[in-house]
Image (cartoon, rainbow, N blue to C red):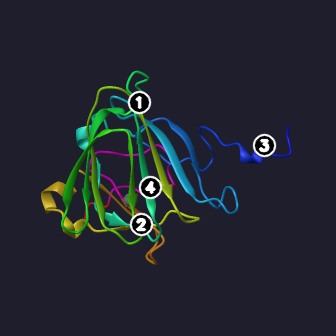
Amino acid sequence: MGKYDKYFLKGVQPWYEDAPGPTVVHMDDTHIKGSHYYFVHWVLKAPTGMPGLDAWGEISHGPHIHKDAELLFHIGTNPDDPMDLGAEVELYMGEEMEKHVITESCVVYIPPGFIHCPWRIKKVDRPWLFIEVNQGPLHTEKSYPQLVPEKDRKMMLFFDERYGEGTKIVLPEGITTQHEGVWVTPDKDK
Ligand SMILES: [Zn+2]
Protein backbone atom coordinates (compact mmCIF):
# COMPACT_ATOMS: atom_id res chain seq x y z
CA MET A 1 0.00 0.00 0.00
CA GLY A 2 1.76 3.14 -1.15
CA LYS A 3 1.23 6.62 0.15
CA TYR A 4 0.35 7.79 -3.37
CA ASP A 5 -1.88 4.89 -4.45
CA LYS A 6 -4.81 7.32 -4.49
CA TYR A 7 -3.33 8.99 -7.57
CA PHE A 8 -3.59 5.80 -9.65
CA LEU A 9 -7.06 5.26 -11.01
CA LYS A 10 -8.27 2.48 -13.26
CA GLY A 11 -11.23 0.42 -14.28
CA VAL A 12 -14.58 0.24 -12.58
CA GLN A 13 -14.82 2.47 -9.52
CA PRO A 14 -17.71 3.05 -7.07
CA TRP A 15 -18.58 6.20 -9.00
CA TYR A 16 -18.39 4.39 -12.32
CA GLU A 17 -20.60 5.97 -14.92
CA ASP A 18 -22.18 3.81 -17.58
CA ALA A 19 -20.40 3.93 -20.88
CA PRO A 20 -21.31 2.10 -24.08
CA GLY A 21 -17.88 0.41 -23.94
CA PRO A 22 -15.32 -0.76 -21.34
CA THR A 23 -14.23 2.10 -19.08
CA VAL A 24 -10.54 2.79 -18.46
CA VAL A 25 -11.09 5.64 -16.03
CA HIS A 26 -13.70 8.13 -14.91
CA MET A 27 -12.60 10.89 -12.57
CA ASP A 28 -13.22 14.46 -11.49
CA ASP A 29 -12.66 16.85 -8.59
CA THR A 30 -14.76 14.74 -6.21
CA HIS A 31 -12.37 11.78 -6.63
CA ILE A 32 -9.08 13.66 -6.72
CA LYS A 33 -9.25 17.22 -5.37
CA GLY A 34 -8.18 19.69 -8.01
CA SER A 35 -8.60 17.29 -10.92
CA HIS A 36 -10.59 18.19 -13.99
CA TYR A 37 -13.19 15.80 -15.46
CA TYR A 38 -11.84 12.87 -17.49
CA PHE A 39 -13.76 9.97 -18.98
CA VAL A 40 -11.88 7.34 -20.95
CA HIS A 41 -13.54 4.35 -22.54
CA TRP A 42 -13.13 1.92 -25.40
CA VAL A 43 -15.43 1.93 -28.39
CA LEU A 44 -15.82 -1.65 -29.59
CA LYS A 45 -17.47 -2.87 -32.78
CA ALA A 46 -20.81 -2.95 -30.97
CA PRO A 47 -21.85 -1.15 -27.75
CA THR A 48 -21.61 -2.99 -24.42
CA GLY A 49 -22.83 -2.34 -20.89
CA MET A 50 -26.13 -0.64 -21.61
CA PRO A 51 -29.01 -3.13 -21.75
CA GLY A 52 -31.16 -2.67 -24.82
CA LEU A 53 -28.38 -0.99 -26.76
CA ASP A 54 -27.16 -3.49 -29.35
CA ALA A 55 -25.90 -1.42 -32.28
CA TRP A 56 -24.31 2.00 -32.65
CA GLY A 57 -27.15 3.14 -34.89
CA GLU A 58 -29.53 3.02 -31.92
CA ILE A 59 -28.05 5.95 -29.99
CA SER A 60 -26.39 9.32 -30.42
CA HIS A 61 -25.61 12.16 -28.02
CA GLY A 62 -27.97 15.09 -28.60
CA PRO A 63 -26.93 18.76 -28.96
CA HIS A 64 -25.65 20.41 -25.78
CA ILE A 65 -23.24 22.88 -24.17
CA HIS A 66 -20.83 22.78 -21.20
CA LYS A 67 -19.70 25.57 -18.86
CA ASP A 68 -16.04 24.71 -19.48
CA ALA A 69 -14.08 23.89 -22.61
CA GLU A 70 -14.28 20.26 -23.66
CA LEU A 71 -11.77 18.15 -25.59
CA LEU A 72 -12.91 15.07 -27.44
CA PHE A 73 -10.05 12.70 -28.27
CA HIS A 74 -10.70 10.03 -30.88
CA ILE A 75 -7.73 7.65 -30.85
CA GLY A 76 -7.33 4.82 -33.34
CA THR A 77 -5.47 1.61 -32.47
CA ASN A 78 -3.96 0.60 -35.79
CA PRO A 79 -0.18 0.30 -35.21
CA ASP A 80 0.41 0.28 -38.98
CA ASP A 81 -1.46 3.57 -39.43
CA PRO A 82 -1.87 5.44 -36.11
CA MET A 83 -3.91 8.22 -37.72
CA ASP A 84 -6.52 5.73 -38.90
CA LEU A 85 -9.47 5.81 -36.49
CA GLY A 86 -10.79 2.53 -37.87
CA ALA A 87 -14.26 3.98 -37.47
CA GLU A 88 -16.57 6.67 -38.76
CA VAL A 89 -18.05 9.21 -36.38
CA GLU A 90 -20.34 12.14 -37.17
CA LEU A 91 -20.12 15.32 -35.11
CA TYR A 92 -22.30 18.38 -35.67
CA MET A 93 -20.89 21.76 -34.66
CA GLY A 94 -22.68 24.97 -33.72
CA GLU A 95 -26.30 25.99 -33.65
CA GLU A 96 -26.28 25.74 -37.46
CA MET A 97 -25.41 22.02 -37.14
CA GLU A 98 -22.35 21.99 -39.37
CA LYS A 99 -21.62 18.33 -40.14
CA HIS A 100 -18.15 16.83 -39.67
CA VAL A 101 -17.16 13.23 -40.37
CA ILE A 102 -14.26 11.86 -38.31
CA THR A 103 -12.31 8.90 -39.74
CA GLU A 104 -8.83 9.78 -38.44
CA SER A 105 -7.35 9.97 -34.94
CA CYS A 106 -7.96 13.53 -33.74
CA VAL A 107 -8.95 15.84 -30.92
CA VAL A 108 -11.86 18.23 -31.20
CA TYR A 109 -11.83 21.42 -29.10
CA ILE A 110 -15.24 22.59 -27.92
CA PRO A 111 -15.23 26.15 -26.50
CA PRO A 112 -17.20 26.89 -23.30
CA GLY A 113 -20.90 27.43 -24.02
CA PHE A 114 -20.56 26.21 -27.63
CA ILE A 115 -23.39 24.03 -29.00
CA HIS A 116 -22.08 20.72 -30.32
CA CYS A 117 -23.49 17.29 -31.25
CA PRO A 118 -25.25 15.10 -32.28
CA TRP A 119 -22.22 12.85 -31.92
CA ARG A 120 -22.97 9.60 -33.64
CA ILE A 121 -20.87 6.49 -34.28
CA LYS A 122 -21.67 5.35 -37.81
CA LYS A 123 -19.43 2.28 -37.93
CA VAL A 124 -16.51 0.65 -36.14
CA ASP A 125 -14.08 -1.55 -38.09
CA ARG A 126 -11.49 -1.67 -35.29
CA PRO A 127 -11.91 -0.87 -31.57
CA TRP A 128 -10.68 2.64 -30.65
CA LEU A 129 -10.36 4.83 -27.58
CA PHE A 130 -12.53 7.78 -26.68
CA ILE A 131 -11.24 10.33 -24.16
CA GLU A 132 -13.53 13.08 -22.96
CA VAL A 133 -11.94 15.96 -21.04
CA ASN A 134 -13.88 18.81 -19.48
CA GLN A 135 -11.55 21.62 -18.43
CA GLY A 136 -13.42 22.17 -15.20
CA PRO A 137 -13.59 20.33 -11.88
CA LEU A 138 -16.97 18.70 -12.53
CA HIS A 139 -18.97 17.70 -15.58
CA THR A 140 -21.65 20.21 -16.58
CA GLU A 141 -24.11 19.91 -19.43
CA LYS A 142 -27.23 21.60 -20.76
CA SER A 143 -29.16 19.89 -23.55
CA TYR A 144 -30.80 21.51 -26.58
CA PRO A 145 -33.32 18.92 -27.82
CA GLN A 146 -35.27 21.70 -29.55
CA LEU A 147 -32.50 21.93 -32.17
CA VAL A 148 -33.25 18.50 -33.65
CA PRO A 149 -36.48 17.22 -35.23
CA GLU A 150 -38.84 15.45 -32.83
CA LYS A 151 -38.50 12.10 -34.67
CA ASP A 152 -34.70 12.14 -34.28
CA ARG A 153 -34.85 12.90 -30.54
CA LYS A 154 -36.12 9.38 -29.79
CA MET A 155 -32.71 7.98 -30.76
CA MET A 156 -30.72 10.49 -28.71
CA LEU A 157 -29.31 10.75 -25.24
CA PHE A 158 -29.89 14.08 -23.51
CA PHE A 159 -28.07 15.02 -20.35
CA ASP A 160 -28.66 17.97 -18.03
CA GLU A 161 -26.35 18.50 -15.08
CA ARG A 162 -25.28 21.43 -12.89
CA TYR A 163 -27.20 24.15 -14.72
CA GLY A 164 -29.43 24.75 -11.72
CA GLU A 165 -32.19 22.30 -12.60
CA GLY A 166 -30.80 19.07 -11.15
CA THR A 167 -29.50 16.09 -13.08
CA LYS A 168 -31.61 14.54 -15.76
CA ILE A 169 -30.67 11.92 -18.30
CA VAL A 170 -33.03 10.99 -21.10
CA LEU A 171 -32.07 7.82 -22.95
CA PRO A 172 -33.48 6.54 -26.23
CA GLU A 173 -36.57 4.40 -25.72
CA GLY A 174 -35.83 0.79 -24.79
CA ILE A 175 -32.31 1.46 -23.54
CA THR A 176 -31.52 1.18 -19.83
CA THR A 177 -28.39 1.22 -17.70
CA GLN A 178 -26.99 -1.07 -15.07
CA HIS A 179 -26.11 1.46 -12.38
CA GLU A 180 -29.23 2.78 -10.71
CA GLY A 181 -28.82 6.09 -8.98
CA VAL A 182 -26.26 7.39 -11.43
CA TRP A 183 -28.59 7.51 -14.38
CA VAL A 184 -32.35 7.97 -14.37
CA THR A 185 -34.88 6.15 -16.47
CA PRO A 186 -36.04 7.66 -19.75
CA ASP A 187 -38.51 10.48 -19.48
CA LYS A 188 -41.20 9.60 -22.01
CA ASP A 189 -42.66 13.12 -21.88
CA LYS A 190 -39.54 14.89 -23.05
ZN1 LIG B 1 -20.03 17.78 -25.01
Q: Are marks 2 and 1 in contact (CB under 8 Å)?
A: no
Q: Are marks 2 and 4 in contact (CB under 8 Å)?
A: no
Q: Earlier in the sequence, mark 3 or mark 1?
A: 3
Q: Residue furthest bottom?
A: 164
Q: Nearer the viewer, residue 144 or 52?
A: 144
Q: Which residues are magenta?
A: 170-186
Q: Are marks 3 and 4 in contact (CB under 8 Å)?
A: no
Q: According to the image, label 1 marks what residue?
A: 82
Q: Earlier in the sequence, mark 3 or mark 4?
A: 3
Q: Residue furthest top?
A: 80
Pointer 2 residue Cβ closer than 8 Å to ligand 1? yes
Q: According to the image, label 2 marks what residue?
A: 141
| Mark drawn on residue 71 | 4
Residue 29 point in image, percent of width and height: 64, 61
Q: Nearer the viewer, residue 85 or 165?
A: 85
Q: Earlier in the sequence, mark 4 or mark 1?
A: 4
- In three-dimensional space, the C-alpha distance between marks 3 and 1, rounded to whole angstroms, equals 32 Å
Residue 99 point in image, percent of width and height: 19, 54
Q: According to the image, label 3 marks what residue?
A: 5
Q: Amino acid at mark 3?
A: Asp
Q: With 190 as the anchor, is 29 left or right in this view?
A: right
Q: Nearer the viewer, mark 4 or mark 1?
A: 1
Q: Amino acid at mark 2?
A: Glu
Q: Amino acid at mark 1?
A: Pro
- In three-dimensional space, the C-alpha distance between marks 2 and 4, rounded to whole angstroms, equals 14 Å
Q: Main secondary structure of the magenta part?
A: loop
